[in-house]
Amino acid sequence: MRQSTRTISVGQKDIREIAGDHFVNINIKVAKTDITAKLVDGVLLAGTLVDKDGKPANGTTSFGILFEDIDFNNSMGTEILPVMIHGFVNKGKIEEYSGDTVSTEAIAALNMIKFL
């Protein structure tokens, strides 16, 4: 088992609109080479829309939303992404955190997620 340390300098991001347990996340293993274009200082940002393989997708192939920031700086090549597939999210926070505007195609594809 690999262990590392991290200094947290900012607060945790929360894309949920309704706090509590009313959301479902699944884990998706993704290679760093598949998401390199979306990394910001080596971090894949919370709110990034991804497809079923964990690759960024903001359209009809969208499968879920990255639940929290994932740091690829000390990665061995792959990481596990927590991807929300069901729940209530704040559309404004998703766009603020990820920097992407959520497309109407993505909203339709994410039919188990309600954008508020």
Image: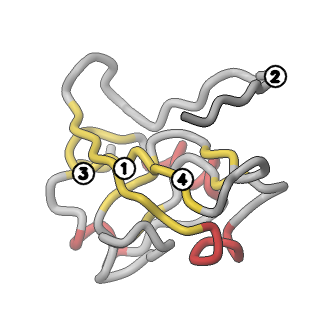
User: Which residue type does callout 2 highlight?
Assistant: Thr
Q: Name the residue under label 1.
A: 83
Query: Between tags 1 and 4, which lies in front?
Result: 4
Q: Which of marks 4 and 2 is in front?
A: 4
**Residue sitting at the far front:** 1
Mark 3 or 4, closer to the camera: 4
Q: Name the residue under label 3.
A: 85
Q: Which amino acid does label 4 sit on?
A: Glu
Residue 116 vs residue 56: left or right?
left
| Quarter of the rendering occupied by the C terminus | top left
Amino acid beneath label 3: Ile
Q: Is mark 4 on a helix, strand or loop?
A: strand
Mark 3 → mark 4, Cα distance in angstroms: 18 Å
Badge 1 element:
strand
Counting from the top left corner in percent of width and height, residue 14 is at 50, 30
Label ID, residue 79? 4
